Amino acid sequence: MTILTAFAAATAMAVAPVQAAPTPDLGGVWEGRISVGGQSIRIVFRVDAAGNAVMDSPDQGARNIAVDRPTIEGGVVRFVIPVIRGQFEGTRSVDGQTLTGTLSQGGLTVALILSRTAATATLASRPQTPAPPFPYRSEEVVFDNAAAPGVRLAGTLTLPEGPGPFPSAILITGSGPQDRDETIEGHKAFAIWADALTRRGVAVLRFDDRGVAASTGNFGAAAGEDFASDVKAVFDGLAARPDIDPARVGLIGHSEGATVAHLAMDDGLRTAWLVTLAGPAVSGGEIITEQVRLIALASGAPSEAIEVAVAAQRQLMTAVAANADDGEAVRREVEAVLLANGQTATQATQNAAVMSGAWYRGLVAYDPAESIRTMRVPMLAVYGGKDLQVPADQNAPVVSRLKPDADVVVLPGLNHLFQPAETGLMAEYGQIETTLDPSVIRTVVDWVAARAGP
């Protein structure tokens, strides 16, 4: 992704955390503009009095994008934006009202001057986020991945009261670097899942992706198989605990997290059950192509323009999938397709660089069909009827056909994050107060509790 498009499209990207201490006097609304591809795009950072921050890109309809707590180190102010693998870095003026620096994402860096326009900011309400006191225990845990030296995965384990051993669930985040709560535009869905399941007697482990928050490693250098190895390491570490029943450990994967679960199971991980939340059942290339069509349709684009965009996307996905093992070949072919479809040389080079990376190539090429067809454990697949990112109509019937004994549920009116939605467009995510609709919580928790046993 490029800075031009990522703010509106990103749902789960991140970079390694900055270790400097948070600074409370950055509270306020900071606003500026970047110039990308001939367009002027407004960028807004909102920091409340407690030092919590979000970012908006109003011109692209994106709001409440999660930002790590702002820091100042050596006179340099940093806003790290995990959701887009981005960062603003700049120096503060003498009066403290201006930040002059750059906004970077991937290999692209643009100048950005931020001016403080208000003294304080009020962040969007997220009333479902669990708050203490809790009727269960919580423990900070770490697991080393022996298959990836230097990768230590940090997380939170919530445990019901009592000695156990307990049934348990491991939560797997969606695409891009994510913290253990899968924080997206201020929503902390995994904290809610952990709370709901633990209250029903199921221990829950949620962990920061490698290179995110308290976990170590290099996220940007990892592909799907690497994330699967992280899940296996966490699974083995959790199952070895005396208070966990190793025969009753299941996986819950959201979006690409479902694909990571399939990859881990393909590689020999033996789980008790699997829940996929908006999980792909067809190849990544098919998913992305359908995303383009549905998002354009929901945005009101003319039918002729949609047809052109879908045809171009299909060309790109074919180029990536046909050369999935050869990054340089993907780069060449993708760049040629982008140039033929009207992108400038700079845009084509930047986008081809992203699409030729190992993670993206694997995402496009992987088809979970065989994994689903040969699965011998109980499976629940849940989809939102207004999901434009992993569409229910495209994926739910495939799961039912490949695994007839799977429980497949489509919940009307819910988007990719399982919020009640109007259009399903990503621009709504931050505007919707609900993090998880009660219907999806009830569906998943009842299913898991029934299979976890007492």
Image: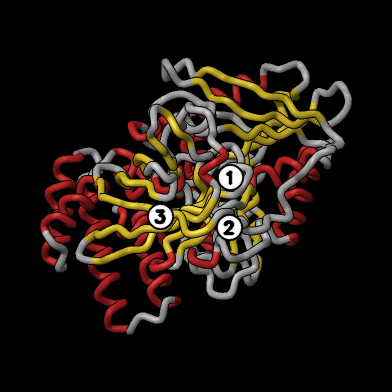
Verify CB contact (< 8 Å) between mark 1 and mark 2. Answer: no
Q: Position of residue 407 (x, y in %)?
A: 66, 55
Residue identified by numbered label 1: 52
Is residue 292 found left or right of 234 in the rendered image? left
Question: Between residues 132 and 99, which one lies in front from this camera angle?
Answer: 99
Would you call the spot at circle 1 few (<14 residues within 10 Å), some (14-19), or many (20 or more)?
A: many
Q: Secondary structure at mark 1?
A: loop
Location of mark 2 (residue)? 417
The answer to whether 339 is drawn above or below residue 239 in the figure is below
Along the polypeptide, which appears first: circle 1 or circle 2?
1
Q: 10 Å neighbourhood of mark 3: few (<14), some, or many (≥20)?
A: many
Q: Residues within 10 Å of mark 2 (few under 14, many from 20)?
A: many
Q: Secondary structure at mark 3?
A: strand
Residue name at image x 46 percent, y 32 percent:
17
Secondary structure, mark 2, is: loop
Q: CA distance from mark 1 to mark 2?
A: 22 Å
